[in-house]
Amino acid sequence: GHMYKNATHLDTCEEKTRYALTYIGPTVIGGGLTTLLSASVLFLCTLVFFTKMATLLVFTVLLSVMHAMLFFVALCAVAGPTKGFGDLPRVSRLFARSTSE
């Protein structure tokens, strides 16, 4: 979301999504992989607590990376904010104006 929002020099949702994936995608994937590798070491432990913690960490990281790289990216490509469309401050001002009347 951060790199998408900072791509002010691009016009369309698709261009902004491609820009965001190019510059921040490898970092997200790398962070997920290193966390998965470090959590997988816990599966070697004999205590039940550590194996359950490893399961929790692995599934949390897998779901969050899948959400970030699949669902959120697709959502940005289809309906991401561009030139005022989908801009949350503008929407909040609209609701504030309609409730004050």
Image (cartoon, rainbow, N blue to C red):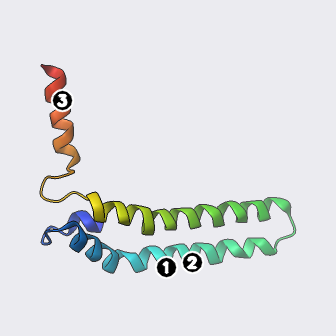
Element type at mark 3 = helix
In this picture, residue 63 sits left or right of residue 91: right
Q: Distance between the residues labelled 1 and 3?
A: 41 Å
First in residue order: circle 2 vs circle 3: 2
Would you identify the image quadrant in which residue 42 lies? Answer: bottom right
Q: Where is residue 21 in the image (x, y as percent from the top left)?
A: 34, 75
Residue displayed at 43% across by 69% down: 69
Identify which residue, 1 or 48, lies in the foreground.
Answer: 1
Residue 92 placement, left or right of 60? left
Percent position of residue 34, x then y:
57, 77
Residue 94 visible, this orientation = yes
Question: Residue placed at 80% from the left, 59% from the top?
Answer: 49
Q: Name the residue under label 3.
A: 96
**How packed is label 3: few (under 14 Cα within 10 Å), some, or many (20 or more)?**
few
Residue of label 2 = 34
Q: Provide the residue designation for mark 1.
A: 30
Q: Give the mark nearest the N terminus, 1 or 3.
A: 1
Which corner quadrant holds the C terminus?
Answer: top left
Q: Residues within 10 Å of mark 1 (few under 14, many from 20)?
A: few
Cα distance, mark 2 to mark 3? Answer: 44 Å
* Callout 2 crowding tier (Cα within 10 Å): few <14, some 14–19, many ≥20: few
Residue 89 pos. (x, y %): 19, 44
Q: Which of 24 and 46 is in front in this view?
A: 24
Badge 2 amino acid = Thr
Q: What residue type is labelled 3?
A: Ala
Depth check, front residue: 56 or 94: 94
The image position of residue 54, as x and y in percent, is 71, 65
Circles 2 and 1: CB atoms closer than 8 Å: yes
